[in-house]
Image (tube, grey):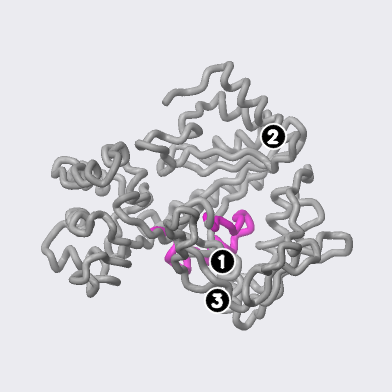
Amino acid sequence: QRAATEAEIAKMADLVREAMKAGAVGFASSTAEAHNGEGGLPMPSRLADDRELRTLVKAMGEGGKGVYMLTRGRLTSIPYLEEIAAESGRPVVIAALFHSNTNPEGAFKTLEQVNEARARGHKLTAQTSACPLSMDFTFRSPYVFESMQAWKPAMAAHGKEALKKVYSDPAWREAVRRELQAARGRLVFNSEWDKLFVVETTKPEHRSLEGATLAELARKAGKDPLDCILDFALEEDLETMFVAQLLHNDEKAVARILADPGTHISLSDAGAHLTFFCDAAFGLHLLGHWSRDLGVLDLPQAVHRLTGQPAQLFGLKGRGLLREGYAADLMLFDPKTVARGANRRAQDLPSGAARLTTSAIGLHGVWINGTKVADDKGLSADPKARPGAVLRDFAA
């Protein structure tokens, strides 16, 4: 709720030093507007001022190691992050570089700035994804809208009845509508109603609408799309499942980004947003779709972007290459069939709640430190086949 004091910053810096000595790979924070806590309060890192950020990154790099990673908000510039990299002498990894149809040149301008910084000798890398960014949600927790200022009353509401009251308020709806129009191209969801689909309904009479876009439904109902989706959600007690295709779905543009060596292909978010999306198979998608099918990268390049490049970026000693003396971390796959499976819901969380997961196609084995831990049927059931260890020592 406020910036940190000098004493608090000093204590945080000591904690960063302690973590680095204990074997942390680096320090991460966020200025992204979509990152909020309970009641819509910004995550603490979003309120960190310049002094706090520079102090913590400096503390991280005092031992000559460490990577600073930032999920970047709209107000955090690439030149500012270049300053951080120059002062600390440490790599800065920036998330997330996605192409947007409503701001088609934005990602390329960012990437140009990153590459200019790299040419000046500063270690900036932009994290990008091999997958389109789509997100499943209900109006109990509609993450795709929560970066909006006008959405704050809904985020502060506790429980279904309080949410329904906010969603039914015409004045609130109008405020949301105005912001969607004014900030188009700068939000998580940018009013692309033709890319927002009904996935799963609760009422039998609505089953035929599954797969329809909100643009279609609004047109048929003669309503504004925002009113249409809110009315639909209210009618179904906020349990309707929607999916929004948000970013990174122009394949020509994404191909340019993936081919740029200034990008780090990553961003699975498979554990961060269990109910919203799961891109855990981004590597398989890179090998199959982008390399084999489209030829954006040849197979050795694609493998390097998933192995050697990230190992070098994060200072993973003895990993990322097939070389004598290195850890035998291996994956056996069929180049002709490798792909990611469709997302599906698994009801296996401790509370019985659902999460999104995906399956591997064309993958025949995984070895960690020389021990086979998975085959084409999945993970080994043998508890002894758990040879992984926490890495605590990284290259400078």
Q: Are marks 1 and 2 in contact (CB under 8 Å)?
A: no
**Label 1 vs 2, first from the N-terminus:** 2
Where 155 sits versus 5, above or below?
Answer: below
Q: Are marks 3 and 2 in contact (CB under 8 Å)?
A: no
**Label 1 vs 3, first from the N-terminus:** 1
**Which residue occupies the foreground of this view, 35 or 290?**
35
Camera-side mark, 1 or 3: 1
Left or right of residue 144: residue 110 = right
Q: Residue at x 70, y 49 (%)?
A: 314
In the image, which disc is placed on residue 19?
2
State the image quarter where residue 173 is shown. top left
Cα separation, mark 1 vs mark 2, equals 30 Å
Q: Residues within 10 Å of mark 2 (few under 14, many from 20)?
A: some
**Which residue occupies the foreground of this view, 278 or 309?**
278
Q: Secondary structure at mark 2?
A: helix
The residue carrying mark 3 is: 294
Q: Secondary structure at mark 1?
A: loop
Q: Amino acid at mark 3?
A: Leu
Camera-side mark, 3 or 2: 2
Q: Are marks 1 and 3 in contact (CB under 8 Å)?
A: no
Q: Residue at x 81, y 60 (%)?
A: 327
**What segment is highlighted magenta in the picture?**
246-269
Q: Amino acid at mark 2?
A: Ala
The residue carrying mark 1 is: 281
